[in-house]
Image (spheres, grey):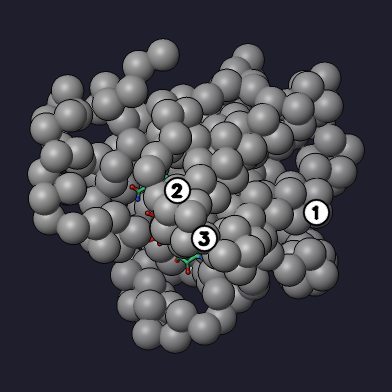
C-alpha cells in the first residue's frame, strides 16, 4: 500500500530514459510516484514495471496521452479518486520530429507541439488549481539546451522547448504566492533512446564540444529535478536549471 503521509508525484514520459530515473529517485526520496506514459508502449511498460518492482507499489503506472486534454483530465480525476492529490508534477514526455524547415510538413510541426508544448499545458492545467488550493505544489518541466541555442533540423523542437520555459515563467508568477513553484530543467545531450538515433560522427562531435567531456546521464538530470521538487526548494521559481556539462553557458 502507498504511504499516505508521503507526497504524490506524477511523472509524464515516466517510462522513458530520463523519466524512469526521475521516478526511481523520487521514490528514493519517499515520494509515491505515478509514471504516466502512452498505453501503446507495451513491452517497455512491462520492462518498467519489472525495474520498479523492488519499490513495492510506491511506483505505479497509469496510461495517458498527454497531448489529449480530455485524457489528462480523466487521468487526474482517476488519480484523485483512487490514490490522492498530486503534489509534484514532472513533465518529461517529449518527442522529436527532426528535419530541416525546408522539408518540414505541418504534421511534423503539430505532432511535436501537441506532445512537447500542449502536453505541458494539459497536465499543468489539471493540477494547478488543486495545488494552489492546498498551498503546495512543485512543477518541473523538461526543456532542453536546444530551446536556448536552437538546433539544426529542430525548428519545431527548439520552439517548443523555448516555449516550455516561457510557459513555466508565466505560470510561476501566477502561483508564486500560493506555495507552488514552477521551474524548468534543460538537459544537454543525454545518453537515452532519444539521442541513440543521432549518427555516430555527430555524436562524437557533440561530445567534443561538451566541457565535461561526456554525454549526460538520466541520473544527472534526475538529480536536478529532485532538487527542485523538495519541500524546502520553496524560494526557487521561474528558474531554468541547465544540466549540460557546460555545453552552453549563459
Ligand atoms: P525518451 O524518448 O526516452 O522518453 C520520452 C517518453 O515520453 C517516452 O517514454 C514516450 O513514450 C513518452 N511520450 C511520448 N509521447 C507521449 C504522449 N503523447 N503522452 C505520454 N507520454 C509520451 O526521452 P528522454 O531522453 O527520456 O527525454 C525526456 C525529456 O527530456 C523530454 O522532454 C526530452 O525532450 C527532454 N530532453 C532530452 C534530452 C536527451 O538528450 N535525451 C535532451 C534535452 C531534453
Between disc 3 and disc 2, the foreground one is: 3
On the image, which quarter does residue 166 sit in?
top right
- Left or right relative to 102: residue 175: right
Image quadrant in which the N terminus is located: bottom right
Secondary structure under the numbered disc 2 in the rendered image: loop
State the image coordinates of residue 245 (x, y, percent, origin top left). Answer: 25, 27
Give the mark nearer the N terminus: 2 vs 1: 1
Q: Nearer the viewer, residue 144 or 49?
A: 144
Residue 121 lies, in percent from the top left, at 74, 49
Mark 1–mark 3 Cα distance, whole angstroms, equals 32 Å
Disc 3 to disc 2, C-alpha distance: 10 Å
Using the image, tell me which numbered label, if any, was put on residue 139: none
Specify the label residue 104 is tagged with: 3
Q: Residues within 10 Å of mark 3 (few under 14, many from 20)?
A: some
Disc 2 residue crowd, few under 14, some 14–19, many 20+, Cα 10 Å: many
- Graded by Cα atoms within 10 Å as few (under 14), some (14 to 19) or many (20 or more), the crowding at tag 1 reads some
Extreme residue in the front direction = 102
Badge nearest the viewer, 2 or 1: 2
Amino acid at each position: 500500500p502507498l504511504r499516505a503521509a508521503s507526497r504524490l508525484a506524477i511523472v509524464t514520459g515516466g517510462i522513458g530514459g530520463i523519466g524512469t530515473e526521475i521516478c526511481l529517485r523520487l521514490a528514493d526520496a519517499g515520494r509515491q510516484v505515478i509514471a504516466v506514459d502512452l498505453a501503446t508502449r507495451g513491452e517497455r511498460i512491462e520492462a518498467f514495471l519489472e525495474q520498479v518492482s523492488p519499490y513495492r507499489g510506491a511506483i505505479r503506472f497509469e496510461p495517458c496521452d498527454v497531448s489529449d486534454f480530455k485524457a489528462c483530465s480523466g487521468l487526474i480525476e482517476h488519480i484523485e479518486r483512487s490514490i490522492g492529490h498530486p503534489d509534484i508534477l514532472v513533465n518529461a514526455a517529449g518527442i522529436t520530429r527532426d528535419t530541416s524547415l525546408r522539408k518540414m510538413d505541418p504534421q511534423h510541426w503539430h505532432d511535436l507541439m501537441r506532445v512537447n508544448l500542449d502536453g505541458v499545458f494539459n497536465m499543468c492545467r489539471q493540477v494547478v488549481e488543486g495545488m494552489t488550493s492546498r498551498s503546495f505544489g512543485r512543477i518541473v518541466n523538461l526543456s532542453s539546451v536546444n530551446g536556448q541555442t536552437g538546433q539544426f533540423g529542430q525548428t519545431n523542437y527548439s520552439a517548443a522547448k523555448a516555449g516550455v520555459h516561457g510557459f513555466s515563467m508565466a505560470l510561476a508568477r501566477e502561483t508564486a504566492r500560493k506555495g507552488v513553484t514552477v521551474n524548468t530543467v534543460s538537459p544537454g545531450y543525454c545518453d537515452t533512446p532519444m539521442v541513440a538515433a543521432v549518427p555516430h560522427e555527430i555524436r562524437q562531435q557533440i561530445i567534443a564540444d561538451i566541457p565535461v567531456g561526456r554525454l549526460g546521464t538520466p541520473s544527472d538530470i534526475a538529480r536536478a529535478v529532485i532538487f527542485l521538487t523538495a519541500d524546502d526548494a520553496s524560494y526557487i521559481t521561474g528558474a531554468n536549471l541547465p544540466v549540460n556539462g557546460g555545453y552552453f553557458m549563459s
